[in-house]
Image (spheres, rainbow, N blue to C red):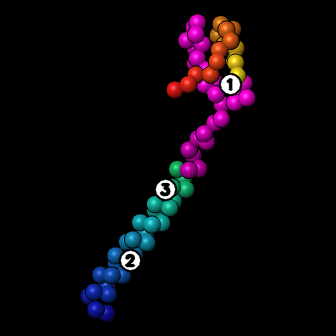
Amino acid sequence: MQPGTIIFLCFAFAAGVLAVLVTMYEFRRKRFEPEPTEDRLFRCGDCRYVYTDDPDVDQSRCPECGRFNTPFVF
């Protein structure tokens, strides 16, 4: 074999191993990453307690003090 062919095969093998490792890493990361939730975020105007509720709720009662609150917008 010529030296150029050997060097090419070494680089091709290294690139293949790297591609497999990146694919495995991405698969594992996506499997353990938490899924985004559709819940709405609420913040109480009296006690400043932050909590979540279902996405179809327009006003939610604070679990700490009982006040009705509107969704918090960032």
Give the residue displayed 56% in from the left and 50% down from the top: 30
**Amino acid tagged 1:** Asp
Give the residue displayed 50% in from the left and 61% down from the top: 23
| Distance in Å between CA atoms under marks 1 and 3 | 33 Å
Q: Main SS of the magenta segment?
A: loop
| Distance in Å between CA atoms under marks 1 and 2 | 52 Å
Q: Image height check: is 4 above or below 17?
A: below
Is disc 2 placed on a helix, strand or loop? Answer: helix
Chain part drawn in magenta: 30-57
Q: Is residue 12 left or right of 55 when viewed as pictured?
A: left
Residue 34, position as x, y percentages in the image: 58, 41
From this viewpoint, is residue 51 visible? Answer: no
| Distance in Å between CA atoms under marks 2 and 3 | 20 Å
Q: Image height check: is 62 above or below 74?
A: above
Q: Is residue 7 left or right of 72 when viewed as pictured?
A: left
Quadrant for residue 69, please give it: top right
Residue receiving disc 1: 53
Is disc 1 placed on a helix, strand or loop? Answer: strand
Residue receiving disc 2: 12
Residue 61, position as x, y percentages in the image: 70, 14
Residue 17, position as x, y percentages in the image: 43, 69
Residue receiving disc 3: 25
Q: Which badge, 1 or 2, comes first in the chain's sequence? A: 2
Q: Image height check: is 17 above or below 52?
A: below
Residue 35, position as x, y percentages in the image: 61, 42
Give the residue displayed 69% in from the left and 30% down from the top: 55
Q: Are marks 1 and 3 in contact (CB under 8 Å)?
A: no
